[in-house]
Image: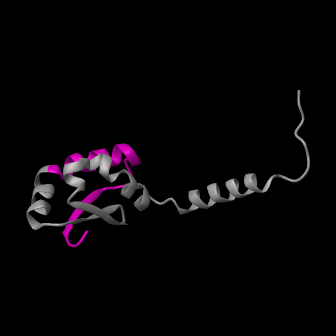
Amino acid sequence: METEKSGPLPIGSLLEKALFGLKKSQESPTNRIAELWPRLAGPKISKHTKPFSLKNKKLFVRVDDSSWAFELTTRYKAGLLKRLQHALGEGAVSDIYFKVGEL
């Protein structure tokens, strides 16, 4: 059985560990949603939308057009919510609100 060597660690190793820790601390549900959104929503929907806020488990998504907002609310909301819950866990997002605005 080999024992671990004592002594100074290479600077590269220390930086890698520090940056990994920083990245983990910066991860948030909102950042994770933004990262997953294109895959979960698909190219057609993600082209017209951008998640921008998560408050009290309610996801707010900007939409570039009122007709898209209506379509998303009436046709796609339930499916998007299920995909988000599957990807992030049941308790992460409880509802989605679509707001018209600049992407």
The scheme the figure's colours follow is one colour
Q: Nearer the viewer, residue 29 or 37?
A: 37
Q: Name, please, the residue furthest toward the top.
A: 1
Q: Is residue 85 magenta?
A: yes
- Is residue 80 visible in the rendered structure shown here? yes
Image side of residue 44 versus residue 88, left or right: left
Which residue is rendered at x = 62% and y = 55% of the image?
20
Image side of residue 63 versus residue 17, left or right: left
Which residue is rendered at x = 15% and y = 56% of the image?
72
Q: Is residue 51 magenta?
A: no
| Residue interval drawn in magenta | 76-103
Q: Give the quadrant of residue 83.
A: top left
Q: Nearer the viewer, residue 72 or 81?
A: 72
Q: Name, please, the residue furthest toward the left.
A: 67
Q: Nearer the viewer, residue 47 or 27?
A: 47
Q: Position of residue 17 (x, y in %)?
A: 69, 54
Count of labels in the image = 0
Q: Position of residue 101 (x, y in %)?
A: 20, 72
Instruction: Reply above or below: 15 against 64.
Output: above
